[in-house]
Image (tube, rainbow, N blue to C red):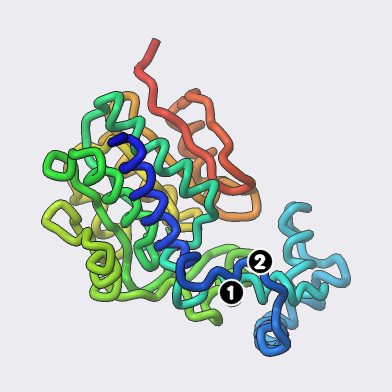
């Protein structure tokens, strides 16, 4: 009975952070207004990258094949529905960009970390509006460990830093135009409050990862990385991996070859000789457990 109550509460929080309680329109066809807004956004971004688009057309851009295919889609082909989807996901109701399978997996990893008594707090680096962290705190409170375990909410609270790769820059232009990723700490705090989950166990670390993370000290049972770019992901891994307990969970939001985070994870694992198997949640989200040697 108590298990059902916990599950129902977490279902409600999950629906709340995705905005589905409020909007309920994720699968509706796009309206003319949405499509025309998406079309205008596409034209603006394409103007900004017109030289790169010309070079791409002539085959003069030297990029890995996977990246040039995506760039083609973004800069040369008509994908107005994809852009409309991006705008819709970014609707004011949604507090997280995570899909429901990713949120379900986050819940499962968080609950397992508690069931298995993996020592430490939970942390997300790259929180945007805070939805995934709200769900993490809800798990801690629902399982009665809110006084013993904290949730760390780590972000610049001023959006992504400038990317260093062309593909990331084009993606960034689309995302920035939809007004995303630049959310103040005060706003994120108000989102926690909305769920009755803002308390002394929710800790905010504000600033660029390269400035805040080297000074952070503590122990983590679950680390979620959602900073998108190569540099952001590598900085977080280099500064936090040793503070993840044995048996702890490392969840990477952007483990997809077109996003910088993928190469950062591979480089870090290769440099440290990490062999723990990576498990797939969806085309983007992956995780592994940090297993003790032997
Ligand atoms: C994709 S959003 C996070 C989405 C969020 N996890 C969710 O549940 O929807 C990426 C976030 O990473 C943050 N970020 C990326 N690189 C950063 C860095 N180097 N330092 C601080 N914040 C960073 C951005 O400010 C942004 O809020």
Q: Residues within 10 Å of mark 1 (few under 14, many from 20)?
A: some
N-terminal label among 2 and 1: 2
Q: Which quadrant is home to the N terminus?
A: top left
Foreground pick, 58 / 21:
21
Foreground pick, 174 / 81:
81
Position of residue 40 measured from the top left corner of the image (x, y, whole percent): 69, 89
Q: Which mark is residue 88?
A: 1
Position of residue 245 measured from the top left corner of the image (x, y, whole percent): 27, 29
Residue 211 in the image: above or below residue 51 = above
Lateral position of residue 145 relative to residue 70, left or right: left
Residue 84 in the image: above or below residue 167 = below
Element marked by disc 1:
helix
According to the picture, the residue beneath numbered tag 2 turns out to be 27
Lateral position of residue 219 relative to residue 8, left or right: left
Q: Where ligand 1 lies, by quadrant?
A: bottom left
Identity of the residue drawn at 69% across and 80% down: 49
Lateral position of residue 113 relative to residue 216, left or right: right
Q: Is mark 2 within 8 Å of ligand 1?
A: no
Taking the view exactly as shown, the residue that stands out farthest to the front is: 1
Lateral position of residue 35 relative to residue 230, left or right: right
* Figure quadrant of residue 272: top left
Identity of the residue drawn at 39% across and 55% down: 12
* Figure quadrant of residue 83: bottom right
Identity of the residue drawn at 77% across and 65% down: 61
């Amino acid at each position: 009975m108590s298990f059902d109550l916990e599950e129902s509460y977490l279902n409600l929080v999950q629906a709340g952070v995705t905005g589905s309680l409020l909007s309920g329109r994720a699968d509706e066809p796009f309206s003319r207004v949405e499509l025309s807004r998406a079309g205008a956004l596409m034209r603006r971004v394409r103007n900004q990258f017109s030289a790169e688009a010309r070079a791409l057309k002539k085959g003069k851009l030297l990029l890995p094949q996977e990246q040039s295919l995506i760039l083609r889609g973004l800069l040369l082909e008509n994908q107005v529905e994809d852009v409309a989807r991006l705008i819709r996901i970014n609707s004011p109701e949604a507090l997280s960009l995570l899909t429901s399978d990713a949120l379900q997996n986050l819940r499962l990893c968080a609950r397992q970390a508690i069931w298995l008594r993996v020592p430490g707090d939970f942390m997300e680096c790259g929180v945007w509006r805070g939805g995934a962290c709200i769900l993490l705190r809800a798990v801690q409170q629902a399982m009665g460990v809110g006084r013993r375990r904290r949730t760390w909410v780590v972000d610049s609270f001023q959006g992504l830093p400038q990317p260093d790769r062309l593909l990331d820059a084009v993606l960034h232009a689309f995302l920035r135009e939809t007004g995303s990723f630049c959310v103040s700490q005060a706003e994120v705090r108000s989102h926690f409050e909305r769920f009755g989950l803002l308390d002394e166990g929710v800790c905010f670390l504000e600033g660029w990862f390269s400035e805040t993370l080297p000074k952070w000290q503590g122990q983590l049972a679950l680390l979620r990385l959602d900073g998108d770019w190569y540099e952001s992901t590598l900085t977080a891994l280099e500064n936090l991996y040793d503070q993840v307990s044995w048996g702890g969970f490392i969840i990477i939001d952007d483990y997809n070859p077109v996003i910088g985070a993928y190469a950062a994870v591979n480089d870090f694992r290769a440099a440290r000789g990490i062999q723990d198997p990576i498990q797939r949640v969806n085309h983007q989200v992956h995780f592994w457990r940090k297993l003790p040697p032997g």
